[in-house]
Amino acid sequence: MRKPRDIDAELKALAEKAKQLKERRVQQLGELVIGTSADSIDAETLAGALLVIAETKDAAKLEAWRKRGQAFFQSKSRSTANGTDQKPSSAGSPDSSAAQA
C-alpha cells in the first residue's frame, strides 16, 4: 500500500526553499553592489541608476553594459585564481554610455 502524501509538509518545505533562494539572491545582489564599489553611492542614486537600466530599451547600450559586466566578472575570477584581490582598473571609472542613459 502506498504511503499517503503529506501535502502540507511538502508545501512548507517548498515555501522554505523559496525563502532560502530569495535570501541567497538578496545576499548575492548585496555582494555585487559591494564588489563593484557601488556601496559608496547613496541609495537614492543607486536606485535611480538601476531604474534607468531597467527601463532602457536600447539594445546597443544593454549589450555594452552586459559586456562590461562580463569583463568585470572575468577579471575578478582571474584575480581570485591568481590569489590577488585587485579591482579592475576600469571598475571605478564611469561608463560614458551609462552616463547617457
Image (cartoon, rainbow, N blue to C red):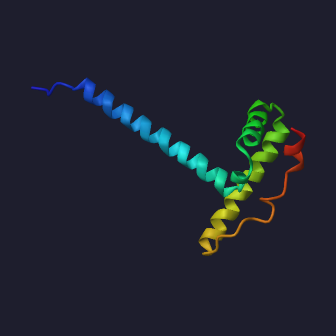
- Image coordinates for residue 25, horizontal then vertical, percent: 53, 43
Above-or-below relation of 67 to 60: below
Position of 68 with respect to 78 (left or right) is: right
- Image coordinates for residue 78, horizontal then vertical, percent: 65, 68
- Image coordinates for residue 49, horizontal then vertical, percent: 77, 39
Q: Quadrant of residue 90?
A: bottom right
Q: Residue furthest left?
A: 1
Question: Residue at the location (48% across, 42% down)?
Answer: 23
Position of 94 with respect to 29 (left or right) is: right
Position of 32 with respect to 96 (left or right) is: left
The N terminus lies in which quarter of the figure? top left
- Image coordinates for residue 2, horizontal then vertical, percent: 13, 26
Above-or-below relation of 75 to 21: below
Question: Residue at the location (81% across, 46% down)?
Answer: 64
Position of 17 with respect to 30 (left or right) is: left
Q: Quadrant of residue 83?
A: bottom right
Question: Residue at the location (26% across, 29% down)?
Answer: 9
The C terminus lies in which quarter of the figure? top right
Q: How many labels does the image show?
A: 0
Nearer to me, 33 or 81: 33
Question: Residue at the location (73% across, 46% down)?
Answer: 42
Above-or-below relation of 31 to 11: below
Q: Quadrant of residue 80?
A: bottom right
